[in-house]
Amino acid sequence: MRLINAKIYPMDAPVIERGWVEITDGMITAMGEGAVTPREGDKDLGGKMLLPGFIDAHSHLGIIGNGVGFESDDCNEVSDPFTPHLRALDGINPFDRCFEEARMRGITAVLTSPGSANAAGGEILALKTVGRRVDDMMIRTAGMKFALGENPKTVYNDRDETPVTRMATVGLLREGLEKARRYQRDLADYENDPENFDLPEYDIKCEALLPLLRGECKAFFHCHRADDMCTAERIAKEFHLDLVLVHGTEGHRIADLLGQSKTPVIVGPLLGDRCKPELRAAQLENAAKLKENGVPVAVCTDHPELPIQYLPLSAQAAQKGGLSFEDALYAITLGAAEIAGIADRVGSITVGKDADLQCYAENPLDLLSEPCFVMIDGAFVRSDESK
C-alpha cells in the first residue's frame, strides 16, 4: 500500500511538503516527493502530517501493572542489590491496558526497564507496543540498568543492608563489573588454550554482563544529581561502557561538561512535583540547556511515574523550556531511537525501516491532539477516519 499526499516528517531528512510512502510486508520500501497517480489500495492523507511512531526511551511499561499493586509490580527485586542477570523480558505483561493507551497516542516502541532500587537492576528490553507475547514484540535487549544515588540508598537503608551510601553503591558496581571482566578473560583463555586453562565455573551474573563489556549493548545509569552523573561517566570510562544517563535532572548544572563527552541523556519525567531530595533542581529548561551544549537528548515519561500517553505532552513541556519544536519532536522519535540503540529499525521514515507510522491533522505534541491513525509494522492499530 501507499500513503500519498502527505506532509512527511522523515526526521533524518528535511520535511517533505507533499510526498508519499510505500509499505510492503510491514516495511517502508519506497518514498518520494510530489504528487502521484492514485492506485487501488492507496490512502490519501489530504496533506496531513505523517510522522514516525513516538518512542519512549525509558519506561516501566508492562513490568509495573496498571492499578493492580504488588501482584503486578515486577520492577524491583530488592532481595539483592546487584541483579544484572534479571531480564525485563521475564516480567512484562503485554495485556496491561497501558500498552493500548500508548498505541492510541502514537507511541509505537518503548524501552521497558527494571527499576532503580538496585545498583544493577537487570536487562532492559526494547519492544513494540502491540502484541500478545513479549517474545514477538521485542526489538532487542537494549542494555543494562544501573542506579546511583538516593534510590539504592533508601531501599537498602530501610532493610538495614548494604548499600546505604553512594560509596557502597559504586563499590558494588566495581566489584561486579571487575568480576565479569575477569570471567571474560578466563573464558578467553580457555577458548584459546583449553589444554592449559580450565573453563571457569558458570556465573549467571557475569554472563549477563558480558554483552555490556563487549560493547554489544548500552549501560543505562539512573541518576538525578550532577555528582552521580559524573560518577556514571567515571565508571563508564573505567570499564569502557557505552553510557546513557537516565533522568539527568541536574544535567543543566554540568551541561557544558556533558557536551564535551557527548554523553546522551534521557530527560524525564518532566511533569510532576519535586517529590524527593534529588529533584530539588528540576526545571523544564534542562533538555534545552543540554541540547544547546551538544548533548544528545531524548524525553521519557518513566511510566507509570507519568502515564505513558503523556509522552508527546512531555516533549511539548521541553519545548516550553526552550527546545525548538523540531528538537522536541526529534527527542521522542529518531533521537530516542538513537540513544536507545534501535535506530536501525525505528525512529524515522526511511526506506528499509519498520513501517511504524502515524498521522496528524494538527500539532502532534499538543494535549488535545489525537492521531488520525497509527501503524505498527505496517498494520493499523488505530484508525479514526473522522480526523
Image: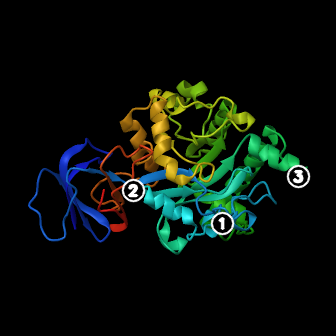
Q: Residues within 10 Å of mark 2 (few under 14, many from 20)?
A: many
**Which residue lies at the image location 65% right of the left edge and 39% below the top edge?**
232
Q: Which mark is residue 346?
A: 2
- Residue 234 spot, x, y in % from top left: 65, 36
**Which residue lies at the image location 56% right of the left edge and 39% below the top edge?**
270
Which residue bears the numbered disc 1? 190
Residue mark closest to the camera, 1 vs 2: 2
Q: Which mark is residue 357?
A: none
Which residue bears the numbered disc 3? 159
Q: Can residue 296 be seen by looking at this rendering?
A: no
Task: Using the image as rendered, state which of residue 169 and residue 194 is in the foreground.
Answer: 169
* Above or below, comparing residue 76 to residue 249 in the picture: below
Question: Colour scheme of this structure image?
Answer: rainbow
Judge from the rendering whether residue 326 lies leftward or rightward of residue 225; answer left or right.
left
Upstream in the sequence, badge 2 or badge 3?
Answer: 3
Residue mark closest to the camera, 3 vs 1: 3
Numbered disc total: 3
- Residue 214 spot, x, y in % from top left: 56, 55
Q: Can residue 88 be seen by looking at this rendering?
A: yes
**In which quadrant will I find the C terminus?**
bottom left
What type is the residue that disc 1 sits on? Tyr
* Above or below, comparing residue 138 to residue 160 in the picture: below
- Residue 221 spot, x, y in % from top left: 63, 45
**In which quadrant will I find the N terminus?**
bottom left
What type is the residue that disc 2 sits on? Val
Q: CA distance from mark 3 to mark 1?
A: 40 Å
* Above or below, comparing residue 55 to residue 268 in the picture: below
